[in-house]
Image: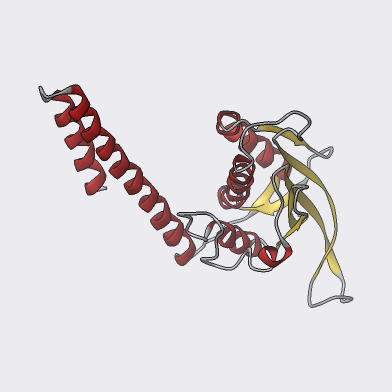
Amino acid sequence: STIGLNAQLLGESIGELEIDDREKGRLLRRIDALRREVDRLRDILQDFLKFAGNVRIETRPTDLNTVVEELADFYMPQAAAMGVRLRTDLAPGPLTAPLDAAHFKQALLNLMINATQAMETRGAQTPGARPKELILRTCAAPPLARGGAGKGGTPGWEVHVIDTGPGIAPEVIERLFTPYFTTKSGGSGLGLATSKRLIEEHAGTISVESRVGAGSDFIIRVPRG
């Protein structure tokens, strides 16, 4: 924070100098690069602190559809700025589940950010290509097993985070939720690991279905309640 503040003050001072415009522009671009790197390091540090810190989940009966709708409304402008159409496909509700709404939103938001970044790598839209879409879908889930397969389970709900990005190779899927594993330059590798941890704290599961060239579907399952 101190580095970022001083970089801002330095940029303002350079802007006030009576020097050649080209030289001033060159100096300001260097300051901007410094501030961007500070922001990136801050994001990595925040990811690490969230992952390393204690998670205190306080659940209460919550409508899953309401949580998804609120998060979609919040993220809509960011998705549009990245050229992605965000839409919801919600099952008739309410879909009541024991949730800590704030932590559940954090887990879901990490998946949404990951999906839009994946679609960003596709570049400009080309004729005949699938549109860049991010779909949030809710539906009933098969019973969540407790104590192992074949030992009964609890009825659950699913949230699907579906994108039309480039898809994920099988060897990457195997490591996708491993802490510090990332395929993105400058990433912390903690976003998806944090989502997995938060979902499991809700007695839920997270998985992904994907095929290279056909997009991805991240599936969150939580018990009803």
Residue 222 screen position, x and y as percent: 74, 57
Q: Looking at the image, which residue sits at the far left? A: 18
- Which residue corresponds to the image point at 42% horizontal and 55% vertical from the top-left? 44
Quarter of the rendering containing residue 45: bottom left
Q: Quadrant of the C terminus?
A: bottom right
Q: Is residue 221 left or right of residue 108?
A: right
Please, is residue 36 above or below residue 51 in the view?
above
Task: Looking at the picture, tell me which residue is in the foreground, 70 or 38.
Answer: 38
Task: Looking at the picture, tell me which residue is in the foreground, 55 or 118.
Answer: 118
Q: Looking at the image, which residue sits at the far right? A: 150
Please, is residue 181 above or below residue 42 in the view?
below
Q: Is residue 84 left or right of residue 138?
A: left
The type of colouring in the image is secondary structure
Residue 133 screen position, x and y as percent: 71, 36
Quarter of the rendering containing residue 201: bottom right
- Which residue corresponds to the image point at 69% horizontal and 54% vertical from the top-left? 98
Task: Looking at the picture, tell me which residue is in the foreground, 159 or 209.
Answer: 209
Residue 131 screen position, x and y as percent: 73, 32
Q: Is residue 38 left or right of residue 204?
A: left
Q: What number of labels is visible?
A: 0
Please, is residue 201 above or below residue 214 in the view?
below
